[in-house]
Image (tube, rainbow, N blue to C red):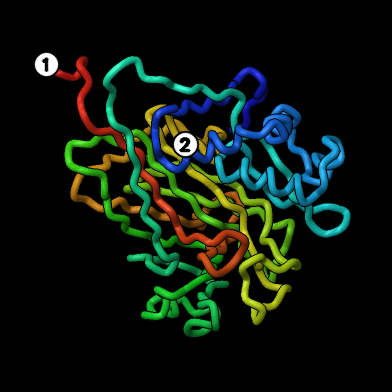
């Protein structure tokens, strides 16, 4: 569902200003530049190409790209590659309308987070339909368009995998300490649609489930190719899928967002994150989806981003005076 009047809804980010976690440091670094603040002001509620940002703010294209990368790493804006008159262009959008920095009034809960990186080939269950396949950084695993290749032991070394419909299921360890309380769960992946070779006009409804609960679907517009990914090996042909977009699914007590945009009302409590139990993450394309356009999933040695699947759980420990009874 699309908001018919998006100006009414303000997207807010609450930041614990004394949290030493790396993502908080990234936010402070991103804001410690007048140029980057100017970029955020300039974007407003628009989607703007990087070259236009550089032109309108009198920046060199390389300088604009550097500042945008820092803002994207902090989660303050997100980018997507979109078709242009000549190939592809990177378009930016601001993730939040306001930032709120929380300062402690006294003794508070200690907040922390744990990150788990899962190789894209580390799935524990799957059901996929051709076109499908897996490759390592050096070659093909098994045979093309053969779902049996997903059973191969070498799948653990996969750096790119793809299928037309179906799912992959991963079991992440729940590493938050005993008696800690989860505040949020974030899943990050580089992903795109799966077309024959590649196709910039190839929508696909990509879904994510956590512990069997559907977070919602995101429609990827393209299977990106024709331009080599920054990390994609030279032996992989440019006519094939080259890179994806880095997507962030975030579940909090208020619901689920993707890149800061509301996706569903599914909240953290609905996921039933129980100590000692794995966190089951499923990524796929339903065979009855409106756009059955498959998916490509990129590992740290393929695409544009040097990461595998990343699951981050922010949590709090300790007790405040209000908790003591």
Q: Quadrant of the N terminus?
A: top right
Query: Relative to residue 298, is residue 281 depicted above or below?
Result: above
The x, y position of residue 156, in whole percent, is: 40, 73
Q: At x 54% / y 52%, what residue is drawn? A: 206
Quote the CA–CA distance across marks 2 and 1: 32 Å
Mark seen at residue 24: 2
Q: At x 28% / y 54%, what residue is drawn? A: 173
Query: Relative to residue 105, is residue 306 depicted above or below?
Result: below
294 left or right of 124 in image? right
Q: Which residue is mark 1?
A: 325
Nearer to the camera, 207 or 140: 140
Which class describes the residues within 10 Å of circle 2: few (<14), some (14-19), or many (20+)? Answer: some
Q: At x 40% / y 58%, what residue is drawn? A: 117
Q: At x 37% / y 65%, what residue is drawn? A: 123
Q: Quadrant of the C terminus?
A: top left
140 left or right of 107 in image? right
Of circles 2 and 1, which is in front? Answer: 2
Mark seen at residue 219: none
Nearer to the camera, 179 or 318: 318
The x, y position of residue 14, in whole percent, is: 47, 26
Looking at the rendered structure, the secondary structure element under dot 2 is helix
Which class describes the residues within 10 Å of circle 1: few (<14), some (14-19), or many (20+)? Answer: few
Nearer to the camera, 197 or 128: 197
The x, y position of residue 83, in whole percent, is: 79, 53
197 left or right of 175 in image? right
Looking at the rendered structure, the secondary structure element under dot 1 is loop
Query: In which image quadrant can residue 223 be found?
Result: bottom right
Query: In which image quadrant can residue 320 be found?
Result: top left
Query: Relative to residue 157, is residue 227 depicted above or below?
Result: above
Please give the count of numbered marks on the rendered protein.
Answer: 2
């Amino acid at each position: 569902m699309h908001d018919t009047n998006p100006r009414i809804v303000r997207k807010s980010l609450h930041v614990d200003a004394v949290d030493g976690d790396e993502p908080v440091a990234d936010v402070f670094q991103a804001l410690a530049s007048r140029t980057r603040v100017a970029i955020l002001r300039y974007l407003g509620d628009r989607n703007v190409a990087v070259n236009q940002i550089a032109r309108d703010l009198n920046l060199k294209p390389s300088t604009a790209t550097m500042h945008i990368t820092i803002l994207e790493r902090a989660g303050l804006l997100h980018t997507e590659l979109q078709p242009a008159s000549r190939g592809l262009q990177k378009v930016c959008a601001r993730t939040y309308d306001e930032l709120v920095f929380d300062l402690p009034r006294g003794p508070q809960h200690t907040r922390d987070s744990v990150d788990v990186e899962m190789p894209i080939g580390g799935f524990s269950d799957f059901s996929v339909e051709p076109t499908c396949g897996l490759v390592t950084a050096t070659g093909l695993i098994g045979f093309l368009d053969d779902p049996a290749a997903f059973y191969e032991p070498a799948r653990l070394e996969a750096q790119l995998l793809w299928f037309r419909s179906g799912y992959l299921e991963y079991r992440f360890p729940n590493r938050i300490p005993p008696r800690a309380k989860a505040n949020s769960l974030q899943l990050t992946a580089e992903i795109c649609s799966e077309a024959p070779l590649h196709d910039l006009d190839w929508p696909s409804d990509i879904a994510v489930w956590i512990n069997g609960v559907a977070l919602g679907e995101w429609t990827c517009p393209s299977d990106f190719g024709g331009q080599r990914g920054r990390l994609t090996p030279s032996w992989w042909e440019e006519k094939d899928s080259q890179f994806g977009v880095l997507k962030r699914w975030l579940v909090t007590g208020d619901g689920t967002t993707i890149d800061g945009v509301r996706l569903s009302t599914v909240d953290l409590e609905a996921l039933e994150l129980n100590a000692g139990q794995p966190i089951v993450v499923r990524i796929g394309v339903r065979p009855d989806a409106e756009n059955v356009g498959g998916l490509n999933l990129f590992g740290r040695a393929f695409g544009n981003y040097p990461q595998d699947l990343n699951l981050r759980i922010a949590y709090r420990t300790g007790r405040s005076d209000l908790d003591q009874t």
